[in-house]
Amino acid sequence: MPSSGYPLELIVRKLGGATRFSQAEQHALRDLPATIWTVEAQRDIVHEGDPATQCCLVLDGWICCYHLLTEAGRQILSFHVPGDLPDLQCLHLPRPDFGIAAVTRATVAFVPHAKLRELANGFPAIAAALWRETLISAAIHRTWITSLGRRDARQRLAHLICELYLRLEAVGLADEHILPMPLRQPDLADALGLTSVHMNRTLKAMRTDGLISLRSRRLEIRDWAGLSAVAEFDPQYLHLSL
């Protein structure tokens, strides 16, 4: 959680992961105007197709981006945790082609596009960091497409767990192969293109095989090497400073 004095401290940490910002750049990021909003689980934060005038920064909780189809239901496109900026591409696109919803009770900060553009124009290092973050989001999307198209259910779930663990570890929310797991089985099914029944069977098989344990919304990876091998997991696409 960010400190009460600097609600946008997370954006400094996130964008500064690969860039050493000057004091002036850090202050400029912290001083961005922001509207803080807390939303309950399963509620929309941004509606698909609405005019885009601000970017969202996750301060607390988990959110997701999704498409809603008339017949096939919901396809979750990505999960986002504290520090993530799920809709940076909307800085240059007039309307999002996806919705954003809270998976858990979540707190988000909305920063006006005009202020972010002004900041990027004044600080080239910040502009580069925003662009880098957008490129990493695209890399994650490509990897999810590969999972949906070519990996079986077991591989998809293993890959997602490996990814979430490393992303959470990078922001100090996971350690020693233990991570919070507030996602419901329907959430996982909607992200992995599976039915809830198939999702349940896949989770059960992975627990039986000793790869993971799951209780009280906490997931423990009991065999990281085995789980990574099942997923053929290569973390390079996350571009984390591990």
Image (tube, rainbow, N blue to C red):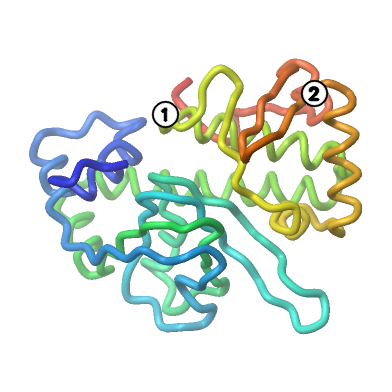
Q: Residues within 10 Å of mark 2 (few under 14, many from 20)?
A: many
Point out residue 75 in the picture as x, y percentages from the top left corner: 71, 65
Earlier sequence position, callout 2 versus callout 1: 1
Label placed on residue 157: none
At horizontal 54% and vertical 78% (from top left) the residue drawn is 48
Q: Is residue 112 above or below residue 3?
A: below
Residue matched to label 2: 211
At horizontal 30% and vertical 36% (from top left) the residue drawn is 13
At horizontal 77% and vertical 34% (from top left) the residue drawn is 158
**SS type, badge 2:** loop
Q: Is residue 16 above or below residue 209?
A: below
Q: Is residue 159 above or below residue 221?
A: below
| Residue 219 location, quadrant | top right
Residue 11 vs residue 182, the one in the foreground: 182
Q: Determine the residue located farthest toward the front in the rendered image.
A: 216
Between the residue at mark 2 and the residue at mark 1, the CA separation in whole angstroms equals 23 Å
* Tag 2 and tag 1, C-beta contact below 8 Å: no
Q: Is residue 112 left or right of residue 100?
A: left
Residue 72 vs residue 177, the one in the foreground: 177
At horizontal 64% and vertical 59% (from top left) the residue drawn is 77
Q: Amino acid at mark 2?
A: Leu
Q: Amino acid at mark 1?
A: Gly
Q: Is residue 22 left or right of residue 188?
A: left
User: Which corner quadrant holds the N terminus?
Assistant: top left
**SS type, badge 1:** loop
Point out residue 144 in the picture as x, y percentages from the top left corner: 70, 48
Residue matched to label 1: 172
Point out residue 4 in the picture as x, y percentages from the top left corner: 18, 46
Residue 125 vs residue 68, the one in the foreground: 68
